[in-house]
Image (cartoon, coloured by chain):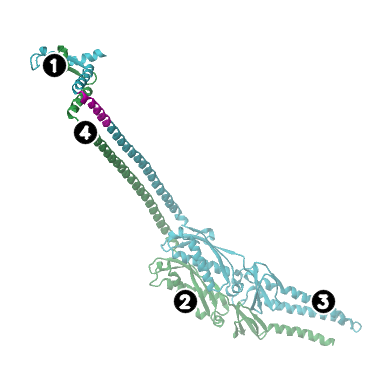
Amino acid sequence: MMGKGKFILPFLALLIFIGLSSVFVVDEREKALVLQFGQIKAVKEEPGLNFKIPFIQEVVRYDARILSLDTDTIEVTPSDDRRLVVDAFTRYRIRDVVQFRQAVGVGGLRVAEDRLSSILNAQIREVLGADQVTSNTILSEDRRELMRRIQRQAQASAEGLGLDVVDVRLKKTNLPDQNLEATFARMRAEREREAADEIARGNEAAQRVRALADRTVTETLSDAERQAQVVRGEADAERNAIFAEAFGADPEFFTFYRSLEAYEKALQGNNSMMVMTPDSEFFDYLRSSDGQQ
Amino acid sequence: MAGNNGGPWGGGNRGGDDDRRPPGGGRRPPEGKSQLPEIDELVRKGQDQLRVLMGGRGGGGRGGGEGGGQGPQFGKGTIGLAALGAVALWVFASLYTVKPEEQSVELFLGKYYKTGNPGLNFAPWPLVKAEIVNVTSERTEDIGRQIGGREEGLMLTTDANIVDIGFQVVWNVADPAKLLFNIRDPQLTVQAAAESVMREIIAASNLAPILNRDRGIIADSAMQNIQETLDEYDSGIRIVRVNLDKADPPREVIDSFREVQAAEQERDRLQRQADAYANRVLAEARGQAAQILEDSEGYRARVVNEASGDASRFTSVRGEYVKAPEVTRRRLYLETMERVLGGIDKTILDKSVVGGEGGSGLVPYLPLNELRRDPAQGGN
């Protein structure tokens, strides 16, 4: 019995080891290939427990998630010859592990990224450099359509790699550094123009306001003057009416009365000198007591 | 156990580690690496156990025939203890806690099994593996102002101007399973999507509205578009908000923009000055106009009053005159002449002195100027 135990236990251990070597778990995040001496024997895309022949077969796992890749910054020349510095990123996944393995071999993702990167650069140049695409197209709502076009073309090209290009999005679309200064200068000039315009408009508005004010002043004053003259005229007319009514009652007496009044006013003070002969009515009694001449 | 803190979010290791993985060969995320070791460990544990058992027995064997019966008894106790320990270890390894801000994703033999909520959770090792993901904590990506703030935030607008944009994207996780299973680099993906979306929006807009009024609109539509993009990847990421904290002209031209603002204020100042002038002269003019009108009214009152007075006086005098015309007439005449002639200098020449009817005899020889002057001097 003791001798049996000596054999059973190592045998049991070996059995467990072999058992464990023949199962493998495929995770949600991965797809696996079962290789036998480098030859693809099985594709395991669904998560779960799987079996293989121990020692002879090996398992290669690939990421099933969406992977990311940033492209290099490249310069493109749209059809209006204005150069733009462009970079993009892509989101892709491994669609067909068999095709992928065949295309990239043991190099795996690194090789795939290199290939995809050059595909993207080429497609970006092609799409953004196409005849009808100008820099204005890139800098507009149409950008989205351009990105979709790049994605479609990259998808077509990457088909052979077993990749699925989910999305390509442009990030930077800037002017090359050597054009920046010119753009800044133009922006400055535009601002200066705007500033000068503001001040000119300010002066214009100010002058308008002043002119209007001056005009209103003149209008106000002249209108007041007119009304004043109307009032004065009415006053004079009223005076004439009053006089006419009063004096018209007895013109002869008025003449007498008014003459006396006028003499008194006209010959006032000591600035008058009179040389006269005493033959006026006033002097009647100066010469004789009976007033006869 | 190792399975609890694998993955980009459960533990401290970020996606960057994954990128450097040797391609093709390693191909498993970190927690996957632990899978085989676990099995190895299990095997090793089993072997250890066997060795202990064998050793115990071997010891007994060395004792020869005499101690043969004791070996199994002693071994039974050891086995019981070991089994108990193993169960305790297993339970301990299978329990894990999820904090309030986290959720766990449990994988049964690699297949999605369920999402675990905060609290104590049980994942029977080694069949079920749990990954803990921080779900509600907000993560912030700064875009456009890292690397020295230079170059990164500069974006080209539709009207070929350049604007310096800086913004933050705040995000958390809506669905931890999707986050784990669908994208490899969540953080990089958020950053790239956010930058791309923002540049797309800026590229489709003119400079002026970006600088002035559209900030809120830009942030809103950026948030919406980033979310749509991430949803296309089925990423399980939720964008909480987008803060557009910088939308300025580039440093090189900002002075010119400030000058425009200064000019706007100058314009305002000029207008206000003119308004002040207008207000002043208009008020003055109104005052003057009132003065003129009031003057004329005064004139009217004076003229009419005078006229009425004069007329009334005349009428009164005439009333008396009519009663005794001859006497009154003479009296008025004499009184007036008295006042008139009393107040002035006069030279009375008799008709005989004047000479003849024409009165032209002496008059030409009178020293009129002196006659005029002397009394004035005498008066003084």
Which residue position is annotated with label 3? B81
Q: Residues within 10 Å of mark 2 (few under 14, many from 20)?
A: some
| Residue B273 vertical position relative to residue B346 in the rendered view, above or below | below
On the question of residue A271 being in view, the answer is no
| Residue at far front of view | B323
In this orientation, which residue lies closer to the viewer: B44 or B318? B318
Which numbered marker is on residue A244?
A: 4
- Marks 3 and 1 sit apart, C-alpha to C-alpha, by 176 Å
Residue depicted at 75% across the width and 83% down the height: A13
Q: Amino acid at mark 1?
A: Asp
| Nearest to viewer (mark 2 / mark 4) | 4
The magenta stretch is: B306-324
Q: Amino acid at mark 2?
A: Arg
User: Do the dots labelled 2 and 4 sit on one chain?
Assistant: yes
- Marks 3 and 4 sit apart, C-alpha to C-alpha, by 149 Å
Magenta span contains residue A204: no
Q: Which chain is cyan?
A: B
In this structure image, what is the colour of chain A? green
Which numbered marker is on residue A222?
A: none
